[in-house]
Amino acid sequence: MLKQSKIKVIRRPDKFHSDDARVITRYFHIGGEHRIQSLLSRIASLSEEDVNQLLTDVLASFASRHKDIKAAFRRHFAYVKSHIEDPDALSENRMLLIGSYFTMEYSIESAALFNPSIVLHPDQTGMEPGQARFIMSLRATGEGHVSSIVFRTGILHRDGHVTFDPPGRFTSKLRTNEDQTYEKKLFFLKLIEMAAYSDAARIILDQLPDFFTLHQLDAKIHELQQSGDCPEPFDETAENMLWLARSNYHLFVPPNTDPSEVVIFPTSENESRGIEDVRLTCFTDDDGSVTYYGTYTAYNGYRILPQLLETKDFNDISIHTLNGKYVQNKGMALFPRRIDGFYYMISRLDGENMFLMKSDNVHFWNEAIKLQGPRYPWEFVQVGNCGPPIETPQGWLLLTHGVGPMRQYCIGVALLDLEDPSKVIAHLPNPLLVPDEAERDGYVPNVVYSCGALVHEDHLIIPYAMSDSASSVATVCLSELLETTIKFSDCCPIPEVKQVSLES
């Protein structure tokens, strides 16, 4: 067991466990053309009376589990209507019944709920002195180990106590907005980076406005294909351009939707096998405007791709590809403001060391330097961040994760210079948070891990995951932590960390 310390870490009693009952509707892929036609033929053989009774039974069993299950049936009927000779001649109930056969429930949290990140909520109305409302993202994992993003809200109290709002009754997978627009200049730069810019791409882009939609891009490609006057390799170029467009999209949040009802489920090809480990940053620009960014990892079963979530209020969400030479690997965390006019990001380019990235454009990252490598035995395997740096008068407080013997993950602390974050000015030699006996067992044993913390009333609030299975919250006195960390030098004794549990 790692040596304990005098820095008091308070484990709060609240724990998030997976809930099998939180389900969304998904399109049910039953197979190819033959199976679809066979199923449709069987449904076509039913009398209208049978159709009405079957639909009544389905709605009685499932309507109470979803906010608007008929809307899901209509969407999924639209996916297969091209297989029907005269779909418009069908009754409304028959269309809904067909849609129900191509619909399945998916339990988004059936496997685990973990790797949380926390920021202050954009709406602080109604808070009493010493209180603050927060919003937390978590990684939810279900059947097939496909991960999605879910949210919880709650209140931080002056004494460090954390209360959570009960989650909404329903969960709702966000849908893409078909009116998403793309900026031609950024699209051009990304095509060059992908080595996908060609004469064909130039011809397509030249005939599009400065801001264009996916529909306009698709229509222009189709028009040029029909003309027969297309430079080679046109089909490959068209495929790359459509892939890029679909990887950058806008999500529609229905009005009056509670954040706890929102599910960001894999949408693009990049994300087909899951969305992992969102690190939320409440970013304040030079003009005082606030944008919430969330860096995360998209996985398609073969490779990972860092992506960027962007929103002003969690009611309107855009998803972008992150671009540039150093957009690699997992665990990218954005600083909450510019420094000397530049964006900064902590990353782990090589899977082993932490790097500092710098850019004048939040979407493009082509400059990076090594910030810190494994130094202490508890982090000898690898070191990375546990969320965005937090600004304090003493420096940028950076929670880190280290991997040591037996692949044990622990949470540590580093302090970076405020004006020059490439300088590590202090580092706790022992971890701040170590898996205790109640946290060691789970899907991935011996892991404590966070994707982002915040400061409230001299408390560092650290939401963290326990062995990739459940999540909880720990708090630390910020002034004590900073005082201990800033005093550390090689000639000082290693500070001890005292782990305290507040189980009721």
Image: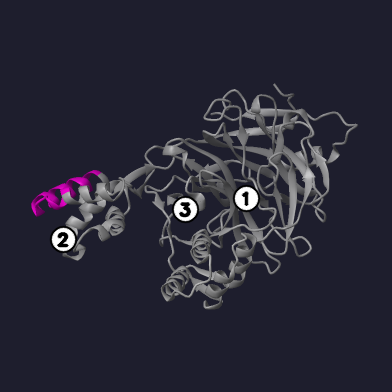
User: Could you say which quadrant of the image residue 187 lies in?
Assistant: bottom right
Q: Report the amino acid beneath label 2.
A: Ser
Residue name at image x 43 percent, y 39 percent: 142
Residue type pointed to by label 3 = Pro
**In the image, what residue occupies the spot 76% across and 65% down?**
341
Q: Position of residue 376 (x, y in %)?
A: 78, 31
Q: Which mark is residue 437?
A: none
Which residue is denoted by mark 2 in the rendering?
91
Residue 53, how many percent across, how many down? 13, 48
Q: Is residue 463 left or right of residue 28?
A: right
- Whether residue 76 sits left or right of residue 201 in the image: it is left
What residue is drawn where x is 64% and y is 33%? Answer: 10
Label placed on residue 259: 3
In-front residue for pair 254/213 = 213
Measure the C-alpha gap from mark 2 to mark 1: 58 Å
Q: Secondary structure at mark 1?
A: loop
Q: Say which mark, if any, is on residue 130.
A: 1
